[in-house]
Amino acid sequence: MPTMRRRELVLGVLAAISAFIGGAGLILLSVFDTAQYTTPHRVFLLVFMMGVSLSAIFTVVEVEWLQLSFARYAEI
């Protein structure tokens, strides 16, 4: 929608940043194997999971607010 509010823009940016962090965690997770680097592997697994989870949460909240704000334009 052309009249997006600031909160939708902020949530979109936060979702993108979280996805980027999750992607970086996944790349680093693949670099550090569990045999030699157990602790870093687990840390980057947590970084990946948190990044992807936060990205999904921000996306869901953004879509819900957009549905509430522009309900009159939604097709039934």
Image: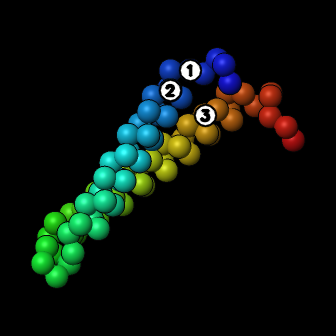
Quick check: 21 above or below 73? below
What residue lies at 85% left-to-right and 37% top-to-bottom?
A: 75
The quadrant in which the C terminus is found is top right
**At label 1, which amino acid type do we have?**
Arg
Compute the Cα span from label 1 to label 2.
Answer: 7 Å
Left-right relation of 3 to 76: left
Q: Which is more foreground, mark 1 or mark 3? A: 1
Q: What residue would you read off at disc 2?
A: 9
Q: Looking at the image, can residue 2 be seen?
A: yes
Numbered label attached to residue 38: none
Q: What residue would you read off at disc 3?
A: 65
What residue lies at 69% left-to-right and 35% top-to-bottom?
A: 67
Q: What residue would you read off at disc 1?
A: 5
Whether the residues at callouts 1 and 3 have beta carbons within 8 Å, the answer is: yes
Report x, y in % for residue 52: 42, 54
Quick check: 41 above or below 5? below
Q: Please, which residue is most extreme toward the top here?
A: 3
Report x, y in % for residue 9: 50, 26
Residue 43: quadrant of the picture = bottom left
Report x, y in % for residue 60: 56, 45
Residue 1: quadrant of the picture = top right
Compute the Cα span from label 2 to label 3.
Answer: 11 Å
**At label 3, which amino acid type do we have?**
Trp
Left-right relation of 4 to 36: right
Compute the Cα span from label 1 to label 3.
Answer: 10 Å
